[in-house]
Amino acid sequence: QQQVKQSPQSLIVQKGGISIINCAYENTAFDYFPWYQQFPGKGPALLIAIRPDVSEKKEGRFTISFNKSAKQFSLHIMDSQPGDSATYFCAASMSGNQFYFGTGTSLTVIP
Amino acid sequence: EPEVTQTPSHQVTQMGQEVILRCVPISNHLYFYWYRQILGQKVEFLVSFYNNEISEKSEIFDDQFSVERPDGSNFTLKIRSTKLEDSAMYFCASSKDRGEAFFGPGTRLTVL
């Protein structure tokens, strides 16, 4: 059973463009939704996270939009840069227990 | 900035051998996790550990797996008798308050 569904699998964006990655979840008990960035050969690095009491959180060029009723959340990367090229994972957890990860999105930002 | 460290970075072992993967979580963190990632696939939960005991484990974490916090700083994952399908990247993570979890760089386990 896939607790968190992520799309698209891969994404190519021009430098300066907006990258948008979407995730959907099933379990309404989830209360913490982080996004992780992973470069090849490295561990996932926490990028930004949100709890369901807010609909949006912004940190620099990264924004999470959260739609509780639709059970969806998305990551927006504004002014995408080649250095943003990485794999992005959404995740969800309940009361800090195990994280359920999405299947990942490979982002390529072309100059 | 504090970070989670893991050793070794790469472990090669023969099928049936025991391996121990080591992690040093961030010092003031209380919750510890092991995850694994088979090449090209998503990150999968193995086990969480709090207050010197397992708080949650997945179906992957069977009798061949065990975790231990032998002292105040290390957190280890032991695989008693490795199988080919255990080949993966193993990530340790730690969390202060069951919120933000910080991952280590991983140990690549190759079982031959």
Image (cartoon, grey):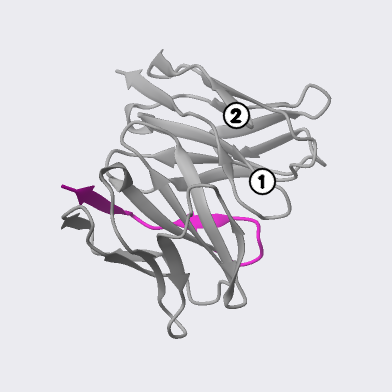
- With B22 as the anchor, is B100 left or right in this view? right
Q: How many marks?
A: 2
Residue B87 sits in quarter: top left
- Magenta-highlighted residues: B95-112
Residue B105 lies in the magenta stretch:
yes
Q: Name the disc covering residue A31, or none.
A: none
Q: Position of residue B44 (x, y in %)?
A: 48, 43
**Where does label 1 land, which residue?**
A93
In the displayed structure image, the side of residue A87 where residue A54 appears, left or right: right
Name the residue at 56% across, 61% down: B48
User: Is A42 above or below relative to B17?
Assistant: above
At 47% from the left and 85% from the top, the residue drawn is B72
Residue A40 in percent (x, y) is at 28, 38
Image vertical order of residue A62 relative to residue A80, above or below: below
Where's the C terminus of chain A, which quadrant? top left
Residue A68 counted in the magenta span? no
Is residue B26 positioned above or below A30 on the image?
A: below
Residue drawn 67% across and 55% down? A96
Residue position marked by numbered label 2 in the rendering: A2
